Image (spheres, rainbow, N blue to C red):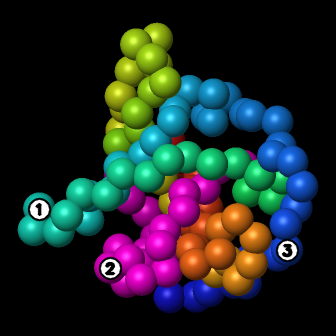
Amino acid sequence: MKIHKFPKATGKDASNNNTINQYHSVEFSINSSYPIYQFKIWNSNSDPMFVLVKDHSNILGYLEEGKKFNLKYYGFDSSYPTEYHDTQIEHIKQCDNGKFKGHYTVSLSITN
């Protein structure tokens, strides 16, 4: 797993894009024998869409930059129904300080 260090606090979050406005969380299911993980979707100036993963989580062993998954996205309300999208892991960054200390940010990009 290629890891990047997360930069120091970047200030206020960036403006929401359409994806962030549509979805509040995303679900990872690696395979049928592995647990399902659901994460809140975040955004910042440097990452338009990312999830936070605790630094000791088992799912980190399955995540790699460039790897693609078919993920389940949950909408904020009934006007944005649950949908599956092919999604690529863009970056995995370790957070050494700030409000995300003890986590990794996993940047996501919907590819379909």
Q: Secondary structure at mark 1?
A: loop
In this rendering, would 98 be left or right of 39? right
- Mark 3 surroundings within 10 Å by alpha-carbon count, few (fewer than 14), some (14 through 19), many (20 or more): few
| Residue toward you, 8 or 107 | 8
Residue where numbered disc 2 is placed = 58
Residue type of the residue flagged with mark 3: Lys
Nearer mark to the viewer, of 1 and 2: 2
Q: Which residues are magenta?
A: 48-70
Q: Residue at x 63, y 35 (%)?
A: 20
- Does 110 appear in magenta? no
x, y percent for residue 88: 51, 60
Residue type of the residue flagged with mark 1: Ser
In this rendering, would 85 be left or right of 95? left
* Quarter residue 99 falls in: bottom right
Above or below residue 57? Residue 112 is above
Q: Secondary structure at mark 3?
A: loop
| Label number found at residue 32 | 1
Residue where numbered disc 3 is placed = 8
In this rendering, would 17 be left or right of 82? right
